[in-house]
């Protein structure tokens, strides 16, 4: 009995931490499973089916309720290159694609600028925020808790040096780390204490493809965020110092996030003022 309670509590917590609405769908599925048709009362299939139905309902409901919390959803699939789009459907499925309308405007302005400067360029969003409640962090990003923070993917080119639309190096956009060039160094030592989120994720290497960083497009984005982006409220941009140095970009708003946060040599983080 206690074991079951602990197990359900762990699943509830995990589902809530990962998707915000998943815990509610899980509790709903547990409560409703006994009311199903007898022939479907399988120990796993019917509860899983119930969970998926409830999760889908809550996911759709989130789209309509999020504006009450000052959030809107980023587009889940590419429609126009002039609009920022979520890199993988996974971010949408997990309900992590919400931003404030002001941040959406900034993201779309960036995507439109990139498309104008380098025609055909698609700007891709990674983790954004959950739809409801400030101070509900989107782990492992401690600061993504108010709709004003967004991670965007680097731009990449193939082995022939051609820009690849909608592709990254990693299937999820994260963890395709750029290593410092000879002569520049990482500011934080490898490992560190238990609070260090500077993961190397070496085991993830098998999932990375051969794409290479598109220096020109990535530098253009950083430059836009630190100059024209300020008109749209962009107040902070996080990228690793060795990468800013390599791409020869600098600015008041381009900063190093410190050693107690995740690395930013696999993606760009930016945030806007209220
Ligand atoms: Zn971030």
Image (cartoon, helix red, strand yellow):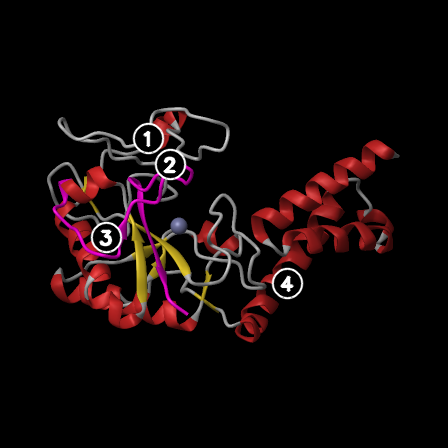
Residue density around tag 1, few if under 14, some if 14–19, many if 20 or more, within 10 Å: few
Tell which of 79 and 92 is nearer to you. Answer: 92
Quarter of the image containing the C terminus?
A: bottom left
- Numbered label attached to residue 188: 1
Tell me the CA gap for discs 3 and 1.
Answer: 33 Å
Dot 1 or dot 4, earlier in sequence: 4
Tell us which disc is closer to us: 1 or 4: 1
Tell us which disc is closer to us: 3 or 1: 1
Dot 2 or dot 1, earlier in sequence: 1
Q: Position of residue 197 (x, y in %)?
A: 44, 35
Tell me the CA gap for discs 4 and 3.
Answer: 32 Å
- Numbered label attached to residue 58: 4
What residue is drawn where x is 17% and y is 31%? 184
Q: Which residues are magenta?
A: 246-274
Q: Position of residue 137 (x, y in %)?
A: 54, 52
Above or below, 144 relative to 83: above
Dominant secondary structure of the residues highlighted in magenta in the image: loop
Please tell me whether mark 1 sits on a helix, a strand or a loop: loop
What residue is drawn where x is 33% and y is 30%? 188
Quarter residue 135 falls in: bottom right
Report if the CB atoms under discs 4 and 2 are less than 8 Å apart: no
Quickly name the residue at label 2.
259
What residue is drawn where x is 25% and y is 72%? 231
């Amino acid at each position: 009995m206690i074991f079951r309670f602990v197990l359900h509590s762990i699943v509830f917590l995990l589902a809530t931490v990962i998707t915000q609405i998943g815990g509610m769908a899980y509790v709903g599925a547990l409560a409703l499973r006994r009311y199903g048709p007898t022939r479907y009362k399988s120990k796993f299939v019917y509860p899983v089916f119930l969970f998926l139905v409830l999760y889908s309902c809550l996911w759709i409901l989130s789209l309509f309720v999020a504006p009450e919390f000052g959030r809107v959803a980023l587009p889940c699939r590419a429609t126009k290159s002039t609009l920022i789009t979520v890199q993988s459907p996974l971010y949408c499925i997990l309900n992590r694609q919400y931003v404030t309308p002001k941040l959406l405007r900034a993201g779309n302005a960036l995507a439109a600028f990139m498309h104008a400067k380098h025609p055909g360029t698609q700007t891709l969003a990674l983790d954004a925020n959950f739809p409801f409640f400030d101070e509900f962090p989107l782990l492992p990003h401690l600061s993504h808790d108010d709709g004003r923070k967004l991670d965007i993917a680097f731009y990449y080119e193939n082995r022939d040096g051609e820009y690849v639309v909608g592709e990254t190096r990693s299937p999820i956009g994260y963890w395709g780390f750029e290593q410092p060039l000879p002569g520049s160094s990482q500011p934080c030592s490898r490992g560190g204490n238990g609070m260090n989120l500077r993961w190397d994720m070496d085991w993830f290497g098998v999932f990375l493809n051969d794409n290479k960083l598109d220096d020109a497009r990535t530098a253009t984005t950083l430059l836009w965020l630190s100059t024209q982006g300020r008109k749209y409220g962009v107040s902070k941009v996080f990228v690793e110092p060795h990468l800013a140095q390599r791409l020869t970009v600098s600015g008041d708003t381009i900063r190093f996030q410190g050693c107690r946060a995740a690395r930013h040599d696999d993606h760009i983080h930016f945030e806007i003022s209220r």
